[in-house]
Image (cartoon, grey):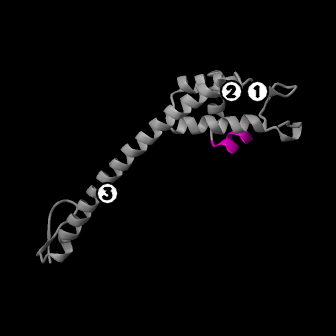
Amino acid sequence: MSTTTDEFLTPAEMADACGVSIDTLRYYEREGLLQPVARTDTGRRRYSADDAAWVRVLRCLRVTAMPIREMREFAELVRRGDEAIPERLDILLRHRGDVVAKLDELHRAIEVIDEKIAAYSTETVATPHADAEPHTRRPTLDGKGVRA
């Protein structure tokens, strides 16, 4: 896909379009995850549609907890072209397995949390509210009661 000058994004536009911060874009550049970014005559960064698509892939990998080391390896394999597709596939299949395992773990955690919520909700309903009990003294902020 070729891009014209009109199709380039500023760092702020790129960050917004990809759901990352400008600092994250710079970090991805420093870590070698992004190819060198095009610049204007005055040195300002200009991101292409291809850059945006790639950052969305990186964000997906990062959100799913792929370590930066593996992201760097994956990025290098992408730069090598089609010859590295089998190696890229291996990385993605391993990562997918890790993500699925983490999802299973999170589902089990939600079940435990739901059990606790149900238990606490039952206890809250079973415990009479203070206003439901007849009493002759009302508590005050300083700990002294006032006769009703």
Queried whether the magenta region covers residue 16, the answer comes back as: yes
Amino acid at pointer 2: Leu
Q: Secondary structure at mark 1?
A: loop
Classed neighbour count for the residue bearing mark 2: other residues with Cα under 10 Å, few (<14), some (14–19), many (≥20): many
Residue 97 badge: none
Camera sees residue 10: no
Amino acid at pointer 3: Asp
Q: Position of residue 74 (x, y in %)?
A: 60, 26
From the viewer's side, name the closer residue of 91 and 126.
91
Residue 146, quarter of the rendered image: bottom left
Considering only vertical position in the picture, is 125 above or below 82?
Answer: below
Residue 34 badge: 2
> Does the residue at mark 3 contact the one at mark 1 (Cβ under 8 Å)?
no
Residue 114 badge: 3
Residue 37 badge: 1
Q: Which residues are magenta?
A: 10-19
From the viewer's side, name the closer residue of 6 and 35.
35
Which residue: 47% across, 39% down?
A: 99
Q: Is residue 127 left or right of residue 29?
A: left
Q: Position of residue 126 (x, y in %)?
A: 18, 69
Which residue: 20% across, 59% down?
A: 142
Q: Is residue 117 left or right of residue 130?
A: right
For the residues labelled 3 and 1, the Cα–Cα distance comes to: 47 Å
Closer to the chain start, of discs 2 and 3, is 2
Q: Secondary structure at mark 2?
A: loop
Q: Secondary structure at mark 3?
A: helix
Closer to the chain start, of discs 3 and 1, is 1
Secondary structure mostly seen in the magenta stretch: helix
Classed neighbour count for the residue bearing mark 1: other residues with Cα under 10 Å, few (<14), some (14–19), many (≥20): few
From the viewer's side, name the closer residue of 10 and 136.
10
For the residues labelled 1 and 2, the Cα–Cα distance comes to: 8 Å
Q: Position of residue 103 (x, y in %)?
A: 42, 45
